[in-house]
Image (cartoon, coloured by chain):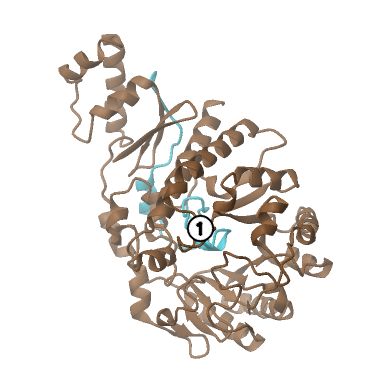
């Protein structure tokens, strides 16, 4: 494409189908404790 | 739904439901102002006419074709069909615990949400008996979850370090018996750190959060000892020593973690100062406080705070790949390998997957609810957990919050902090607007940093 550069390949909808195993870190455990940022957590799904 | 913005010379388009991020040129950026989900296959004549004074017909048609191609690929104006996952927004096993090992502190930080350690109660250290019962409680309620997290929190956990060690030893002894893996974190102000504690922390804690606000004058203004003296000179060398030793393994995760207030809206200078002092994993977060407090951030401060986040993001872009590169917690974003949409929908998990335990063994939805007696939801000794409360929090997800449903940032903040919502809006389902605005700005900056990295490849 000449006018667009898509910078990521992941699709959230696809991740929903295989997701939800719950083994990932609880977001508040990393550093925040006073705010909520979930999207910076790592996925730990073994079957991914 | 899309969200588009211009930052640092980049025209960025986020397709909310797919998570796709596009760097576009000005033509597409402007065309998208006139388009929505009801996209026709061919460029509407009135659009062609409107843009023809500034762009050639060939360019406009070409750009429009690319928009249609993205739409067909499900990467632009993609539909919201997450309702089918609503059945996953239910009660889950408890997998994370904040253990209030000490309701006491040797600092008197002005902004402390824990009432300088007391949590609206009295100063108290947790006994090993309570800590042991808390481990049993977590194992019991974790059901089939393998990875369990335990954060030693306070107050100041180092004031009760012998019990920290005992609890770690006990939890490790239970791992094989129950097929669990414990990951420990400790959050400390550093005043009592010594070589033995550093050694233990680096050996056992998969993450350590080191509290320091940045420059000496900034830190010492709000983070003072009981006698009013600042703590910067005491804690900085200890934190440097801990981080240096931590590089030997086995765990590499740590954060120096500060709070910025109305007193230091130039907080990027504190981030940079911490980097200059040898730290490369940095988190500096906005204070959450009653608006009447002198240090509280309010809506009037937002323009300055936004400008500072943008300044910090641009500095990070400039430093990327150099030896002065560093990680800023609130700009961390992996657009390809981040958490699944289910995790994003569920939110922080407090009161459902995550609980806090007081020195008495009482269970609360999270550390910020501790002391608010009406939110108590169980006790570690009788293994109780209030099923109605748990259900309430399980449903406090993105789609349970009216204002979040329509927000472009919903898959990144996941509905925000329920405790902030409770404390400042009186309802865990009503997001705290000030926090939302800052979160959205941080997210725009974080995506821009990713876009810049991609652009430089």
Badge 1, how many Cα within 10 Å: few under 14, some, many 20+? some
Label 1: chain?
Answer: B
Chain A on-screen colour: cyan
Q: Quadrant of residue B316?
A: top right
Chain B on-screen colour: brown
**The C terminus of chain B sits in image quarter:** top right
The spot of residue B34 in percent (x, y) is 23, 27
Q: Residue at x 62, y 31 (%)?
A: B318
Kindly tell me whether residue B335 is visible in this rendering: no
Q: Residue at x 45, y 69 (%)?
A: B353
Q: Residue at x 47, y 57 (%)?
A: A36
Instruction: Examine the rendered structure and indicate whether residue B225 appears above or below residue B8.
Output: below
**The N terminus of chain B sits in image quarter:** top left
Instruction: Examine the rendered structure and indicate whether residue B222 appears above or below residue B309.
Output: below
Q: For this view, does B342 lie left or right of residue B356?
A: left
Q: Which residue is mark 1?
A: B296
Q: Residue at x 61, y 71 (%)?
A: B153
Kindly tell me whether residue B235 is visible in this rendering: yes
């Amino acid at each position: 494409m000449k006018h667009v550069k898509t910078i990521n390949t992941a699709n959230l909808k696809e991740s929903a189908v295989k997701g939800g195993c719950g083994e990932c870190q609880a977001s508040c455990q990393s550093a925040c404790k006073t705010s909520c940022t979930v999207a910076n957590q790592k996925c730990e799904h073994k079957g991914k | 739904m899309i969200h588009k913005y211009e930052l640092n010379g980049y025209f960025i388009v986020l397709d909310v439901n797919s998570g796709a991020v596009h760097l576009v040129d000005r033509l597409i950026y402007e065309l998208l102002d006139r388009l929505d989900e009801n996209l026709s296959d061919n460029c509407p004549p009135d659009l062609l006419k409107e843009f023809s004074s500034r762009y050639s017909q060939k360019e406009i048609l070409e750009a429009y074709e690319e928009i249609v191609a993205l739409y067909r690929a499900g990467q632009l104006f993609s539909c919201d069909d997450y309702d089918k996952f609503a059945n996953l927004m239910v009660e889950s096993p408890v997998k994370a615990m904040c253990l209030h090992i000490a309701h006491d502190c040797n600092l008197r930080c002005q902004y402390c949400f824990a009432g300088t350690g007391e949590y609206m109660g009295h100063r108290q250290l947790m006994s090993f008996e309570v800590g042991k019962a808390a481990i049993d409680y977590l194992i019991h309620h974790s059901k089939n979850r393998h990875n369990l997290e335990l954060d030693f929190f306070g107050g100041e956990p180092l004031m009760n370090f012998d019990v920290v060690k005992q609890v770690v030893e006990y939890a490790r002894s239970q791992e094989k018996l129950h097929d669990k893996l414990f990951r420990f974190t400790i959050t400390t102000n550093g005043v009592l750190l010594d070589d033995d504690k550093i050694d233990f922390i680096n050996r056992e804690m998969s993450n350590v959060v080191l509290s320091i606000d940045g420059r000496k004058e900034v830190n010492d203004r709000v983070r003072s000892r009981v006698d009013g003296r600042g703590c910067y000179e005491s804690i900085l060398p200890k934190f440097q020593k801990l981080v240096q030793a931590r590089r030997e393994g086995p765990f590499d995760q740590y954060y120096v973690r500060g709070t910025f207030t109305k007193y230091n809206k130039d907080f990027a200078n504190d981030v940079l100062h911490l980097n200059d002092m040898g730290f490369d994993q940095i988190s500096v977060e906005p204070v959450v406080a009653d608006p009447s407090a002198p240090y509280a951030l309010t809506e009037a401060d937002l323009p300055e705070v936004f400008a500072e986040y943008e300044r910090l993001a641009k500095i990070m872009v400039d430093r990327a790949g150099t030896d002065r590169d560093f990680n800023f917690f609130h700009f961390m974003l992996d657009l390809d390998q981040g958490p699944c949409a289910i995790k994003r929908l569920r939110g922080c998990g407090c009161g459902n997957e995550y609980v806090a335990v007081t020195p008495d063994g009482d269970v609360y939805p999270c550390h910020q609810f501790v002391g608010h007696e009406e939110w108590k939801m169980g006790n570690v000794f009788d293994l109780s957990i209030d099923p109605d409360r748990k259900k309430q929090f399980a449903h406090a997800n993105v789609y349970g919050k009216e204002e979040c449903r329509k927000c472009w940032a919903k898959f990144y903040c996941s509905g925000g902090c329920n405790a902030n919502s409770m404390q400042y809006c009186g309802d865990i389902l009503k997001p705290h607007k000030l926090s939302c605005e800052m979160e959205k700005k941080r997210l725009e900056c974080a995506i821009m940093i990713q876009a810049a990295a991609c652009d430089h490849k």
